[in-house]
């Protein structure tokens, strides 16, 4: 397997088509083996799996519960990485201003950051897909109006859209979810519409229409599955973007409330200690955020390459 | 060859592309000579290595390609192995090239003037004014009306034929001793083709430049060339004077090519087509590359045919050439 | 052409109207207007007076009309904190933001185009891969965190550059600018780099993609066949072709820089309108928030409009399409 991966040309400029593989592959296995071809992407996927695991099971694997007042002592505050508390515990990444174990806080923060990011991505994808499918399927006026709205919204940067919404709605988990969904849905709508238009022009949709299958059946059973490949790529890119945006908004103090200490809030907390060289309080949550976003983006890059050969240059 | 001085002698030229899929032997042992003032036609189907031959001569083979063997002797000097600066000072100066698609050869965002003047200044330390005059004269020479105005224009304001004239004017700017014209009429309308062909021939005679006229169309080259080299799968399979090649083709491939030239006699009939396709030059099997398509192939053809000189001025690469004059 | 411009103008007007409605409804329906528009420290009589003044006892559509009429006259309310008209506050902060955004844009172009072209010319070289890896990071890294790291490294640990504020300014044509004083320039450097990182990555990618496309064009090979030096081929023939798309995209991106300066200004305490709106959000200074949003939206609509029109002048195909529709 690895040998084969080595021999396969990467994204070079070969003029001749590469010799066809002899083995018969199912589309899914082909997809998996194509993905594993890139060592960086495979590593990124593994890293992301670890992060997702930490996020899911933070309460069970974190050394302490940083928000359980019984386990936190202000006497332990601002301790550098590797310090030992008077009760013998070791703070691998040090403690924050309130004496919380930073490693545990990061585990819990990942849980919130990833949770909010992924949830907003899923809802936005659902909304955007339905809207995009409707635009492609009904065409005409419906399409024109929907795509105008999409174009106009996408002409504004995400941070501005989020600012408008948060200024109007205020703070809160639900509010930031709404903002993140609003920022993302248009990308999904545009992607789904584009690939649905291509699919719609193919014969089998005509056939389905002739068979008088219902709109909904045609849309969801026939059109949607064929829009999946580009959608998967957009999901990764947009989720990474949503996580970064949430962190940014929370850092600015207009995102999540302090009761939901995501990575962005942890970084914001550490910012005030930066000038006194207590760097770790800001740096380590930032590193966690960075690893999360970069790993998702690298996975997304590889997915784009294998799912959309036209983009391969 | 015809007694005069030799402008260019290509000897055993091999240009290979080292792709990830394998080695593409685009040019694999090509030899020919071009005498002073002579027009040599290089003919072959698409993909036979004509363009790569041209680029090998002027040292512009793109990676992963490389001249791996052979010599290119120009005015007594071997160009293979010259350094970049020596090669640059030759290009567009002593050896000029005209490309196939005139819509693509001129830079769309630069004025014609800029593109001509820079070609003069690249090789001559003259004032810009003088370079501009040279550019204007060259435009006039290739039959472009009101050249002064046209200098200020951008390429998209010209038709395809006009652009090819500009490209020819650029090639002529520094009075080269050799012009390589790579299918310069292929992308043009038939009427324009005729004009350009006539113009190029005339200019070549006037300036005394030698020319390599590359084409896949034997009919085009028959009217202009003094001698013809027929190329197939990276090799020259037959070479001779235009009259010899047209009247007495000896190589089965050349005979096939001539069979597919429309003429008065064949009008209305379906053109004879050589069956099959040009082989891929990637990992080409040994033996005669034309074997799969040749009607007279036999076991001898599993071995590579060596070049032979059955008649004066004639080169052939075939085990079973047709050397009678029954045609 | 005129039809095209009129259509675009109408569309822009609709966008601005929708935004004003959104902000208005947001303030008046979702939130409590009294809460939002009146200084929380006012007493009962004052509240009633303001309610009457603002017409809050009127039906909603009348109120909206009132808001629009005032807005059109440049009256977007007074700041609770500063007691000044909100619009004036924002306009005062504008030069700082614009200076930062322009500096970031220049950095992105001046560094991004050469880096992108280099990476495009030798895509397999080690340093090309480094440049591209850097640009992936530039896209992925949240800029606020990079800003913090920059402060930590260059201000706190190395002590080379100041971490906050705008430094000394001098007036140019009545506008205070930092970049002309040594102190101001040293204050400008870190925030400008921070703000430019994302666009820098974008320019690198655009320039690289453009280079890889253009370098294989016949006209580049023809330029070489003319015997031009490699320097001239790259600096004139290649660069001129990739500049057009890069500059077009950057024109569109300027608004994005202004919007994202919210983050950079907050990290570096740069006294521009981005920091103002975040402060105002924290201090519940709603009139300033509303005014900022209206102004930035208006700015975006104008930028998009201008880019659209300029584009349609440059590219006849866009025009054709639109008159047919
Ligand atoms: N950059 C390249 N990489 C790999 N192979 C190439 C490259 N350029 C040309 N070739 C190969 O060289 C062969 C000859 O091409 P060319 O000289 O353009 O043919 P012609 O001009 O006779 O139509 C073709 O088979 C082509 O595949
Ligand atoms: S060598 Fe044999 S196969 Fe090749 S052309 Fe001659 S006869 Fe045909
Ligand atoms: Mg060719």
Image: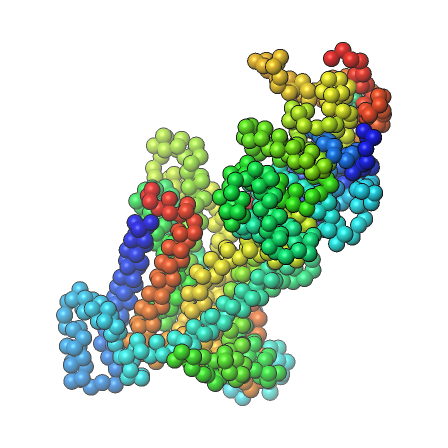
Give the answer, above or below, for where C22 lies relative to B124: below
Q: Is B40 situated left or right of A305 in this image?
A: right
Classify residue B162 by image quadrant: top right
Q: Depth check: give the residue in front, C297 or A68.
A: C297
Residue A207 at x, y = what percent? 40, 31
Q: Residue at x 73, y 13 (%)?
A: B327
Q: Residue at x 30, y 51 (%)?
A: C2
Tell me if I can see residue A229 in this picture: no
Q: Depth check: give the residue in front, C37 or C186.
A: C186
The colour scheme used to paint the residues is rainbow
Q: Depth check: give the residue in front, C144 or A264.
A: C144
Residue C265 at x, y = what percent? 45, 76
Q: Is C50 situated left or right of B64 in this image?
A: left
Q: Residue at x 75, y 54 (%)?
A: B85
Give the answer, above or below, for where A56 lies relative to B267: below
Q: Residue at x 51, y 52 (%)?
A: A233
Residue B219 at x, y = what percent? 65, 24
> Across the whole image, how many numbered discs are drawn on residues?
0
Residue C250 at x, y = what percent? 48, 61
State the residue lying farthest toward the top: B326
Tell me if I can see residue C322 in this picture: yes
Quadrant, the C terminus of chain C: top left
Q: Is B320 situated left or right of C225 in this image?
A: right
Give the answer, above or below, for where C38 lies relative to C245: below
Classify residue A299 by image quadrant: bottom right
């Amino acid at each position: 397997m690895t040998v084969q991966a080595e021999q396969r040309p990467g994204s070079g400029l070969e003029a001749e088509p590469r010799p066809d593989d002899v083995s018969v592959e199912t589309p899914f296995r082909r997809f998996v083996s194509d993905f594993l071809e890139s060592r960086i992407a495979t590593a990124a996927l593994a890293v992301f799996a670890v992060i997702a695991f930490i996020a899911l099971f933070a309460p069970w694997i974190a050394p302490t519960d940083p928000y359980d007042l019984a386990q936190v002592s202000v006497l332990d505050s601002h301790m550098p990485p590797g310090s030992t508390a008077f009760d013998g515990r070791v703070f691998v990444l040090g403690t924050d201003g309130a004496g919380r174990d930073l490693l545990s806080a990061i585990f819990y923060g990942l849980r919130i950051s990833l949770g909010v990011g992924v949830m907003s991505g899923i809802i936005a994808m659902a909304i955007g897909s339905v809207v995009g499918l409707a635009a492609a399927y009904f065409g005409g006026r419906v399409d024109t109006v929907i795509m105008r709205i999409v174009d106009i919204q996408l002409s504004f940067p995400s941070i501005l859209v989020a600012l408008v919404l948060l200024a109007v709605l205020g703070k809160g988990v639900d509010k930031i979810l709404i903002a993140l969904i609003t920022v993302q849905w248009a990308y999904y709508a545009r992607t789904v519409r584009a690939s649905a238009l291509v699919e719609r022009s193919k014969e089998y949709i005509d056939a389905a229409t002739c068979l008088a299958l219902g709109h909904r059946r045609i849309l969801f059973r026939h059109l949607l599955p064929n829009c999946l490949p580009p959608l998967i790529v957009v999901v990764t890119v947009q989720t990474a973007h949503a996580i970064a945006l949430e962190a940014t908004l929370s850092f600015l103090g207009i995102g999540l409330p302090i009761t939901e200490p995501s990575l962005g809030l942890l970084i914001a907390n550490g910012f005030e200690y930066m000038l006194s060289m207590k760097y770790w309080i800001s740096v380590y949550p930032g590193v966690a955020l960075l690893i999360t976003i970069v790993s998702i983006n690298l996975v997304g890059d590889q997915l784009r390459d294998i799912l959309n050969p036209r983009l391969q240059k | 060859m015809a007694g005069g001085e030799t402008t260019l002698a290509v000897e055993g030229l091999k240009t290979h592309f080292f792709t990830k899929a394998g080695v593409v032997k685009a040019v694999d042992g090509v030899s020919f000579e071009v005498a002073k003032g002579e027009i040599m036609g290089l003919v072959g189907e698409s993909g036979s290595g004509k363009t790569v031959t041209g680029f090998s001569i002027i040292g512009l083979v793109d990676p992963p390609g490389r001249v791996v063997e052979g010599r290119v002797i120009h005015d007594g000097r071997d160009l293979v192995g010259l350094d970049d600066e020596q090669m640059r000072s030759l290009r567009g100066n002593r050896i000029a090239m005209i490309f196939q698609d005139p819509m693509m050869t001129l830079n769309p965002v630069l004025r014609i003037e800029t593109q001509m003047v820079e070609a003069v200044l690249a090789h001559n330390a003259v004032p810009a004014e003088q370079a501009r005059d040279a550019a204007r004269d060259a435009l006039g020479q290739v039959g472009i009306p009101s050249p002064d105005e046209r200098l200020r224009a951008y390429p998209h304001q010209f038709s395809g034929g006009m652009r090819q004239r500009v490209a020819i004017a650029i090639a002529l700017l520094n009075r080269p001793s050799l012009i390589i014209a790579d299918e310069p009429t292929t992308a043009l309308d038939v009427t324009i083709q005729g004009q350009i062909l006539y113009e190029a021939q005339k200019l070549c005679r006037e300036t005394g430049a030698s020319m390599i006229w590359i084409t896949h169309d034997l009919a085009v080259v028959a009217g202009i060339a003094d001698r013809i080299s027929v190329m197939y799968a990276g090799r020259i399979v037959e070479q001779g004077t235009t009259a010899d090649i047209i009247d007495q083709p000896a190589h089965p491939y050349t005979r096939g090519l001539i069979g597919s030239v429309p003429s008065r006699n064949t009008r209305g009939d379906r053109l004879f087509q050589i069956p099959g396709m040009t082989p891929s030059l990637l990992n080409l099997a040994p033996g005669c590359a034309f074997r799969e398509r040749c009607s007279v192939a036999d076991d001898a053809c599993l071995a590579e045919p060596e070049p032979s000189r059955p008649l004066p001025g004639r080169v052939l690469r075939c085990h079973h050439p047709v050397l009678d004059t029954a045609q | 052409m005129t039809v095209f411009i009129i259509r675009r103008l109408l569309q822009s007007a609709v966008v601005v109207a929708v935004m004003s409605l959104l902000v208005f409804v947001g303030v008046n329906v979702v939130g409590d207007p009294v809460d939002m528009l009146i200084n929380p420290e006012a007493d009962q009589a004052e509240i009633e007076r303001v309610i009457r003044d603002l017409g809050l006892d009127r039906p909603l559509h009348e109120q909206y009309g009132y808001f629009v009429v005032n807005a059109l006259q440049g009256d977007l309310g007074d700041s609770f904190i500063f007691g000044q008209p909100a619009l004036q506050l924002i306009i005062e902060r504008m030069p700082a933001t614009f200076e930062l955004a322009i500096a970031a844009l220049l950095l992105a172009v001046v560094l991004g185009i050469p880096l992108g072209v280099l990476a495009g010319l030798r895509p397999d070289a080690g340093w090309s891969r480094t440049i591209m890896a850097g640009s992936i990071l530039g896209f992925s890294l949240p800029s606020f965190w990079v800003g913090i790291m920059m402060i930590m490294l260059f201000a706190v640990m190395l002590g080379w550059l100041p971490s906050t504020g705008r430094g000394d300014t001098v007036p140019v044509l009545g506008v205070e600018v930092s970049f002309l004083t040594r102190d101001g320039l040293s204050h400008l450097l870190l925030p400008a780099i921070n703000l430019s990182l994302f666009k820098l990555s974008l320019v690198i990618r655009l320039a690289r993609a453009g280079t890889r496309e253009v370098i294989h064009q016949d006209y580049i090979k023809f330029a070489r066949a003319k015997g031009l030096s490699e320097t001239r081929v790259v600096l004139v023939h290649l660069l001129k072709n990739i500049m057009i798309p890069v500059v077009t995209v950057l024109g569109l991106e300027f608004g994005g820089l202004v919007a994202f300066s919210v983050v950079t200004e907050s990290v570096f305490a740069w006294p521009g309108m981005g920091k103002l709106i975040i402060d105002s959000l924290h201090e519940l200074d709603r009139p300033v928030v509303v005014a900022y949003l209206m102004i930035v939206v208006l700015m975006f609509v104008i930028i998009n409009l201008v880019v659209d029109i300029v584009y349609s002048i440059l590219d006849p195909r866009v025009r054709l399409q639109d008159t047919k529709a």
